[in-house]
Amino acid sequence: MRYAYYPGCSLEATGRPYEESVAAVAKALGIELVELEDWNCCGATAYMSINEVLSFSLSARNLCQAKKIGDTLVTACSACYTNLRKTEAYLADFPEIKGKVDTALAEAGLRYDGGVTTKHFLQTVVQDVGLDRIKSLVKHPLTGLRVAPYYGCQIARPYGIEDDADNPTMMDKLLTAIGATPTYYPLKTMCCGGSLMGIRKEVALRLCRNLLLCAQQYDAQCIVVTCPLCQMNLDAFQSSVNKTYGTNFNLPILYFTQLMGVSFGLDSKGLGLNDCIVPATGVTAKYA
Amino acid sequence: MYMLKRMAIRENRQRSKNAAALSRAFFEIVNKKGRNHETSLMAKVVLGTNPLGGISLAPVGIGLFTHHRLPMFGKSIRDIKGLQKIVAKAKEIGGE
């Protein structure tokens, strides 16, 4: 399997453990991820706040680069996934917007005429590789590990992965396939606060508190995520939540790829497990 | 929702100055380098909105830095001039 791959900016910084574990798991699964040449930022939500056509033009430039490699573009970042999917949809459905984006792209000698479908890496793993193949690679089943599956907002809706928007189960099935026990987690698609952590911290901390509390109430030993921003908010700001609310959370926040890697018996250093702020080794060491 | 936000930023009528500061800082970084550099973004937003309040964020920043998750320098794309031309034209013709 060969795909065009868009890392996104966060995976070069706060989400670096995600990048490492995606690469390790892809290699184990026989997936070739071909990084887009000279890719640019997807614009996140900031560009959409300034100018819609500008935001679509940024993602369209990346879709042009993807087209050179193939017809499927894979990304592991939920925010990048949403922007790329939204751009695909708008360019297909709104000729006026496409015309403006074409005009902007032409300034750099580019043109995008469709033909690329964006997938989240979770979809690639579950839908393209398949759960049977994943089960066959498990060397250390995560038996007894209770995991809260947290999907966040952006891969659930409005341009979500092919799953239930309110109660997705794709990651639950994946966790079961590697031997873990997904807990009941009714807040699985609620927001972590996203970039509000930088501008309205009190709001984001409350949202993170709710997510951590819910996981704890259902006896989860860790929370598993699909998004670098969700991971950073819940991991790096967990001590801020404790300080603000007088709680004592100590829940590791792991990427689904990190848990997959542990179950496959991959080296923990190559999965970025040592770079979680809330130490993850307490829940993963017994399976290594 | 985004249209209201864009209008508020354009007319400087946003209720939260911090939100507009974040969008503007993000825009500046990406337009200069082609990619976001999270370390610069955090520094710009904190210094531009609440420098003293930023002290409370120091432990988080140090934690990320010591875990190699806040690189000192960002990467720039090769064809930044091409991207800047796209950005300039999109802004010119974009409307809302």
Image (cartoon, rainbow, N blue to C red):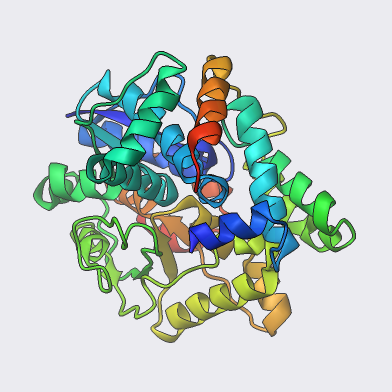
Q: Give the side of residue A145 with respect to residue A191, left or right.
A: left
Q: Is residue B40 above or below residue A171?
A: above
B15 vs A213, nearest the viewer: B15
Q: Quadrant of residue A183?
A: bottom left
Can you say which quadrant of the picture contains the N terminus of chain A? top left
Q: Residue A164 at what x, y percent from top left?
A: 21, 68
Q: Is residue B80 visible?
A: yes
A42 versus A102 height, above or below: below
Residue depicted at x 73% and y 76%? A243
Residue at screen point 25% across, 73% down: A167
Q: Which quadrant of the view contains residue A223? A: bottom left
- x, y (%) of residue A229? 52, 54
Task: Determine whether A25 is above or below A157 in the image.
Answer: above
- Between A5 and A142, the residue placed more toward the observer is A5
Q: Is residue B57 above or below residue A245?
A: above
Q: Along the line of sight, which residue is nearer the eye, B54 or A116?
A: A116
